[in-house]
Image (cartoon, rainbow, N blue to C red):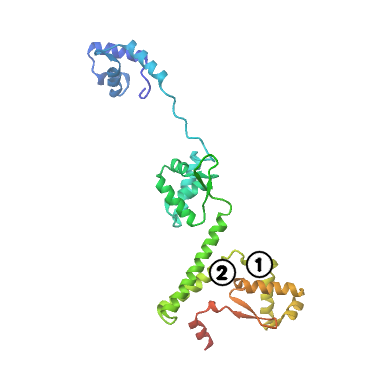
Amino acid sequence: MPGERLTREERLRIEAWLAEGLGYAEMARRLGRPTSTISREVARNSVVGVYAAGNAQETAGRRARLRKPARPAEPVHDGFPSASARGFVDEFAGLLAATGLPRMTARVFACLLISDGLTSADLVRRLRVSPASVSKSVGHLESMALVLRRPDPGGRRERYAVDDGAWLRAWQADTAAHGRIASAARRGIELFGPGTPAGARLGEMSRFFGRLSEQMGDSGLAEAVGYDALTVVAALVQAARPLGLDALSAALGWPRDRTRAAAEALRRRPVIADPLVVRVTGDQTYRLAVRADRLSPAQREALEK
């Protein structure tokens, strides 16, 4: 059959047909072999222009014994590169790339995500890319706080890894970036003036990213233990009037310290009561107001008419 080694019987037939003057194409047709197989066989195993089937069979056997064994498949490390793991990396990288992450960076991240740490050489071998591509992608991931460098226990190389704290670091990095955008937008308002079209757009941008940064803060609602802070807001809405610390505590049936702690959480994290804010006067009286950044100056002016 095509692709299999020639047998002794086939070689004997080739020897006889050569003696008869049969052409290579006809021999190939009779044996069901490619013509190139016959021509290579004769050229490789002819001595002084004469083809001998016995010598050809013995030479072929020697070559088979000396032939190196097939190279074993690359060992699996942390489940990669098995076929299923490689498929997951490609699929997951495609999803990340659809969100705007560069394709190569997404592939490097997906590869690191399913490992316990890889060196640059590991990534080059597994993703079959250049060291420069790996270096650029790792740098991008480090700027997003998603990847850490660790010393390689087995040598002087560094290993890259995605640890359990990656998500919190990335979250905090985004929060800080949003806060910086809000601050830059506020500086732009001062530069161009709040009454200009540019100032109005920057004002809207500042309010949006300011709220986003505040809502993504790492403490967030955790400071409102047991939803006490929201309960204070609900009580002030229900009362529809300012309340002192003693009156509010009595109405809620709480100790003064608990009420004060809930109000302090509202002061530190205004986002808890958004779009309202709790104001505290010097005599510890609490009242509700609308957050100033929820409405633009034009909107407030229109509502006050």
Q: How many marks?
A: 2
Q: Which residue is mark 1?
A: 223
User: For this view, does 35 lie left or right of residue 288?
Assistant: left
Q: Residue furthest left?
A: 21
70 displayed left or right of 222: left
Q: Are marks 2 and 1 in contact (CB under 8 Å)?
A: no
- The answer to whether residue 227 is above or below residue 126 is below
Q: Residue at the bottom extreme? A: 305
Name the spot of residue 44 as percent of width and height, x first: 29, 18
Seen from the viewer's position, the closer of residues 57 and 179 is: 179
Type of amino acid under label 1: Glu
Q: Quadrant of residue 277?
A: bottom right
Nearer to me, 221 or 22: 221
Residue 89 spot, x, y in % from top left? 48, 46
Kind of residue indicated by mark 2: Glu
Which residue carries the number 2 mark? 214
Q: In percent of the image, x 23 and y 15: which residue is there?
A: 22
Q: Residue at x 44, y 53 (%)?
A: 97
Q: Is residue 232 above or below residue 129?
A: below
Lateral position of residue 270 relative to residue 105, left or right: right
Q: x, y (%) of residue 121? A: 45, 42
Q: Which residue shows up at 49% across the image and 82% down it?
A: 297
